Image: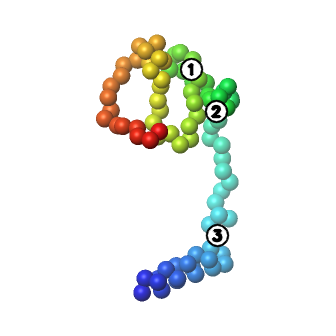
Amino acid sequence: MHKLALALLLIAALRPGAGRAAEECPPLTILGSVPMQSGADGRIYVQAAVNGTPVSMLVDTGGFFTELAQPLVTALKLPTFHTGFRLVGL
């Protein structure tokens, strides 16, 4: 019975006109942009400010957290706290 339901679902997905939703979508609109630059290491960076201090921040589209290097945290005397999260395999 599961094979029949899967086959019917596959047929429905492949039928002509299944992609019509894309035709009804409005075109993409750019809401904002940020100048980016390539670093000496080949990675992409943007200019930002942390507590009014200009810094260069790495763009990481796969990153889950925003992170600051410890030397910057120390130089800006930013408060720190433990979140309980562990980053493993990075």
Q: Residue at x 67, y 32 (%)?
A: 42
Residue 45 x %, y %: 62, 29
Residue 25 x %, y %: 64, 60
| Quadrant housing the N terminus | bottom left
Between 48 and 27, which is closer to the camera in this rendering? 48
Q: Residue at x 57, y 30 (%)?
A: 58
Name the residue carrying label 1.
55
Q: CA distance from mark 3 to mark 2?
A: 36 Å
Is label 1 in a helix, a strand or a loop? strand
Mark toward the viewer: 2 or 1: 2
In the rendered view, would you say 46 is above or below 55?
below
Between 13 and 59, which is closer to the camera in this rendering? 59
- Indicate the amino acid at tag 2: Arg
Q: Residue at x 58, y 81 (%)?
A: 11
Q: Looking at the image, do the residues carrying marks 3 and 2 touch, with CB atoms under 8 Å apart?
A: no
In the rendered view, would you say 15 is above or below 55?
below
- Indicate the amino acid at tag 1: Val
Name the residue carrying label 2.
43
Name the residue carrying label 3.
19
